[in-house]
Image (cartoon, helix red, strand yellow):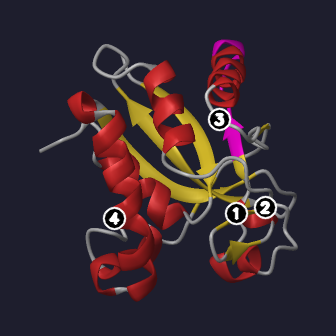
């Protein structure tokens, strides 16, 4: 039986690309979560005034890849010590956050943040939040597979994230 969780770690194109490469991940959907605006658009979220983060909804087979591994991959492929930014992307819409869908996921999110903090000099600013999910516009879905590989921003940001994934989780990455 599949399980779903939502994470936000900067640009959703970049986070989506990471999880699309993971064995056992069945689907990844880019979207918005954590704010007050109903049915936000990309243009609205980019202003930083909606309260929403760019996130990804990850549906996976827990028999193949565990929630622990999903959260560790999330923490390990972005910089969770940066407050409201990832690289040149600045604003609350780029915050590091986990949006658990159950008490068990909330507990596992706390453990993942603690594991990251134990192994790094700077503490994670990753928050654990609740929120309503809004899928992003169609042109944002599977962006890396299409337009992203022609986008200079994506070409600069995504390959290093994929290298981190392959280095730390080699046995969980698709060939």
Q: Residue furthest front?
A: 121
Q: Compare marks 4 and 1 and give the one earlier in the sequence.
A: 1
Q: Compare marks 4 and 3 and give the one earlier in the sequence.
A: 3
Q: CA distance from mark 2 to mark 4?
A: 22 Å
Asked whether disc 4 touches disc 3, contact meaning CB atoms under 8 Å apart, the reply is no
On the image, numbered disc 3 is attached to which residue? Answer: 120
Q: Residue at x 41, y 77 (%)?
A: 156
Q: CA distance from mark 3 to mark 2?
A: 19 Å
On the image, numbered disc 2 is attached to which residue? Answer: 84
On the image, numbered disc 1 is attached to which residue? Answer: 94
Q: Residue at x 62, y 70 (%)?
A: 87
Asked whether disc 1 touches disc 3, contact meaning CB atoms under 8 Å apart, the reply is no
Q: Residue furthest left?
A: 175
Asked whether disc 2 touches disc 4, contact meaning CB atoms under 8 Å apart, the reply is no
Q: CA distance from mark 2 to mark 1?
A: 5 Å
Q: Secondary structure at mark 2?
A: loop
Asked whether disc 4 touches disc 1, contact meaning CB atoms under 8 Å apart, the reply is no
**Rendered-image quadrant of the N terminus:** top left
Q: Secondary structure at mark 3?
A: loop
On the image, numbered disc 4 is attached to which residue? Answer: 159
Numbered range of the magenta stretch: 97-104
Residue 117 visible to an observer of this rendering: yes
**Tag nearer the camera, 4 or 3:** 3
Q: Position of residue 40 (x, y in %)?
A: 72, 69
Q: Residue at x 28, y 47 (%)?
A: 21
Q: CA distance from mark 1 to mark 3?
A: 21 Å
Q: CA distance from mark 4 to mark 3?
A: 22 Å
Q: Position of residue 119 (x, y in %)?
A: 61, 28
Q: Position of residue 81 (x, y in %)?
A: 72, 48
């Amino acid at each position: 039986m599949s399980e779903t969780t939502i994470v936000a770690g900067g640009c959703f194109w970049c986070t989506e690309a990471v999880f699309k490469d993971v064995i056992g991940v069945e689907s990844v959907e880019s979207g918005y979560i954590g704010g007050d605006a109903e049915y936000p658009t990309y243009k609205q979220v980019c202003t930083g005034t909606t309260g929403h983060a760019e996130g990804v909804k990850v549906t996976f087979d827990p028999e193949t890849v565990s929630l622990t591994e999903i959260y560790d991959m999330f923490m390990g492929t972005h910089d969770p010590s940066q407050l409201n930014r990832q690289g040149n992307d600045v604003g609350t819409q780029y915050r590091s956050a986990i949006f658990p869908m159950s008490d068990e996921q909330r507990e596992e999110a706390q453990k993942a943040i603690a594991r990251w903090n134990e192994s790094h000099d700077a503490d994670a600013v990753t928050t654990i939040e609740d929120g309503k999910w809004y899928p992003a516009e169609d042109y944002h879905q599977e962006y890396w597979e299409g337009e992203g590989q022609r986008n200079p921003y994506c070409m600069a940001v995504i390959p290093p994230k994929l290298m981190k994934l392959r280095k730390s989780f080699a046995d969980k990455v698709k060939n």
